[in-house]
Amino acid sequence: MFDRQELLLLCDVFGRCRIQAVILSPQEWQARTAAPRLHSFEHLFSQDHAFRGVSLPLAPGAVFRLTDSFDRRFLCLELPDGARSVLCIGPFVSTAPSRERLLALGETNRISPQNQHLLAEYFGALPVLTTDNPLFVLFATFCERLWDSPTFEIHDVSDTEPTLLHAEDTDQNDTLLHIKAMEQRYAFENELLRAVSLGQLHMESQLFGAFQEESFEQRLTDTLRNSKNYCVIMNTLLRKAAEQGGVHPLHLDRISSAFAAEIEALPSTAKSNALMLDMFRGYCRLVREQAMRGHSRTVQNALLLIGNDLSADLSLQALSTALGVSAGYLSAVFKKETGQTLSAYVRKKRMETARQLLRSTDLQVQTVAAHCGILDTQYFSKLFKQATGKTPKEFRAVK
């Protein structure tokens, strides 16, 4: 059963995963497949180019999976909309290509060795969909509903004919490949920054494929230093994105400095991908926890004072005096903007810090309590048990 809203939703989901999904009229599809293959980089990495000269006898109830000479994959099917429109999805790859595979693809398709790194940069930003990716479950479910059948045909087609680029156009081709690779990289960076500025931790699975060592341009002979430099760039970009997301520079400086130390301590290039992913997660969490969008200046400053030093006097009276407002006003505006009382918020933050210190250090309980701004150890233990259901010693004993 054809439902255009379901179709548009499917296209939107793929689009959010950085995979192009377009609906073509029969005339547009015919024009694509009948057109001769253009041997230039201007068209090489477009979805349009992938179907040039390829014979796909589309029919209702059938999906075609095309793999082109660059190992890129596409899905296409005829829609039962009365007009015989065609849905085209792609490109994506099933696995991130290794350096060796990229070298082979470059040689087969006549990409100059000097510009091999641009090919790696392009593929580094392509989405990776493994066979167990939920997107395929979504696509299969859509097809079942589309044709009102639990089964449908799948035809695998391999277009192995290489795109042999004209040798006389080498300079122009290399320039166009560079442009395309740069566009791909900047599009990914913009998506990455947007995800961080919104605190979208769930985007991790969609962006993970881009955290590949193979996609890093080798600008230095020292491979470790090269990886560290990319991590430094990433740290800077994510810090600015988190700032746009409403995080105060005080928090940004702390996390940025911590990641900078981790970058310099990187033992090998193999660890750089994991560190970049940790940075993405860390900045996303920071935005979710510390973003001050929508808060008044008074509440922003109160949150900063609380986050800066939990061992300080953070009573309502002390904070209102420090902020130059009345205790009644601070209490009311804080509850209105955060949904909780100031004392409850301070207590929550102190217990969060207590859990972290008990788990990660061997500090004595009274010392942990002091770091959390509670000098009475018995009172600290009481609050901690109320928050976690365990005493500090019991909590620490659980591994």
Image (cartoon, grey):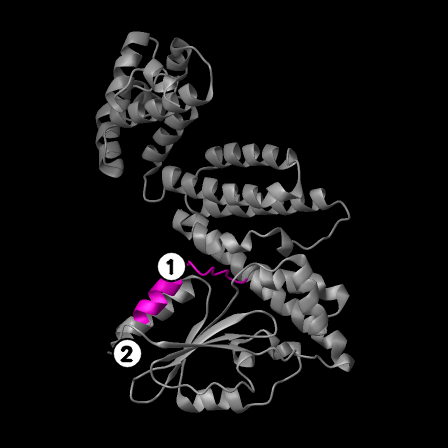
Label 1 sits on residue: 134
- Report if residue 135 lies within the magenta region: yes
> Who is closer to the viewer here, 149 or 296?
149
Identify whether 351 is placed above or below 272. above
Label 2 sits on residue: 147
The amino acid type, in three-letter code, at marker 2 is: Trp
- Residue 105: % across, % down: 67, 68
Task: Compare marks 2 and 1 and give the one earlier in the sequence.
Answer: 1
Bounds of the magenta segment: 126-142
> Who is closer to the viewer here, 37 or 347?
37
Asked if one can make out residue 376 in the rendered structure from this viewpoint, the answer is no
> Residue, x 50% and y 57% (percent of image)?
190
Say whether marks 2 and 1 touch (CB < 8 Å).
no
**Mark 2 to mark 1: distance in Å?**
20 Å
Left or right position of 104 against 22: right
> Residue, x 46% and y 63% (percent of image)?
18
